[in-house]
Amino acid sequence: MSPAKKTAPPVAGVTVPLVTGLSDSESRIYHSVFDSVMNQRIAPGTKLPEQALCELFSANRATVRKVLQRLAHDHIVDLRPNRGAVVAAPTPEETRQIFEARRLLEATIVPLVAQRISKSEIASLRKQLRDEHSAIHRADQPAWARLASTFHLRLAELSGNAILHGYLHELVSRCSLIVALYEPPGNAACEHDEHARIVDYIENGEPAKAVRVMNEHLLDLERRICLDKPQAEKSLAQMLGLG
C-alpha cells in the first residue's frame, strides 16, 4: 500500500488526492474524471478511450496517458493490456477483501487510541461529532460524508502509528470509491450515533467494546453496497459533464 497522500478539498464525501507532478491541463482531466466517477455520472466499467479524451480535452496522447496512469495508481480506473482504460469496477471478492482489511486495521487502531488519547483529544473528537450532527440536521450530505471519513482517519492519527494511518488512508479511499459507485442513494456513509458510541467506549477505557461497535459499523456499511447497478446510455462527454 502507498503512504498517506496530502489532500485537496473533498468531493461527495471522498478524500480527494492532491495531485502533484501534473500540469494544469493534466490536473483538469484528472479531476474531471475523478469528480464524474465519484458523483456517479460515469458508471463502473465505462471505457475511457484515449482518442476520445484527447478530443474532449484538446490534449495529446502523452498527456492523457499520464493522467490515466495516475488515475490507475489511485484505483479510480483499471488499465487493461490491449483494451485501454475503464472505470474501476471492484468485484464482490475485491470488495469483501477491502472491507475485511479495513475492519482488521481499525480493530488494531482503536486499542492504540484508547491507550494514549488525552482529554484534549477526546474533546476534539467530541467537537467533530458535533459538526457531524450539525451537518446531518442541515441535510448537508457531502459535508456529513466528509466528516464521517475524517473521523476514521483522525482515530488513525491518534493511534500514534504513521504506518497504520497511511494504510488506513488508502483503504478509506478505496472504500469511498466503492460506496460512491455502488451504495444506493439516500444512505449515510457512516452513522453518527455509532461514532459517538466508539468515542464513549474509548473515553471510558473500554477498547474491546469500541472495537465491537467499529466492526459492526463497517459491516453495516459493506452490507449496503449494491454491486449490480444499471448503466445509463450517455455519451462520454455527457458523463464527464462536457456535453
Image (spheres, rainbow, N blue to C red):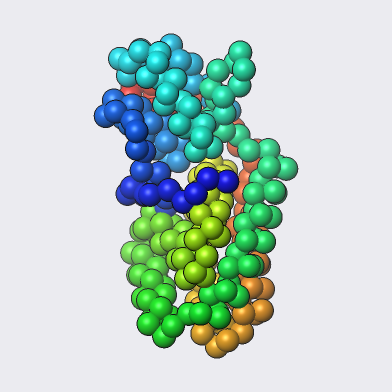
Position of 88 compared to 237: left or right?
right
Q: Considering the image in quadrants, where does the C terminus appear?
A: top left
- Residue for point 49% across, 21% down: 48
Q: Is residue 114 visible?
A: yes
Q: In this view of the protein, which residue sits in the foreground, 100 or 37?
A: 100
Q: Residue 151: image x %, image y %?
A: 46, 65
- Residue for point 55% across, 60% down: 164
Q: Is residue 42 visible?
A: no
Position of 239 compared to 23: left or right?
right
Position of 185 compared to 242: left or right?
right
- Residue for point 68% across, 42% down: 94
Q: In this view of the protein, which residue sits in the foreground, 104 or 195?
A: 104
Q: Residue 139: image x %, image y %?
A: 37, 61
Q: Residue 160: image x %, image y %?
A: 49, 69
When asked about the image quadrant of residue 154, the answer is bottom left
Q: Residue 211: image x %, image y %?
A: 64, 73
Residue at the limit of the structure toward the bottom, as seen here:
204
- Compared to 181, does 136 lie above or below? below
- Residue for point 36% across, 38% down: 19
- Compared to 84, does 128 lie above or below? below
- Compared to 52, does 206 lie above or below? below
When asked about the image quadrant of residue 105, the answer is bottom right
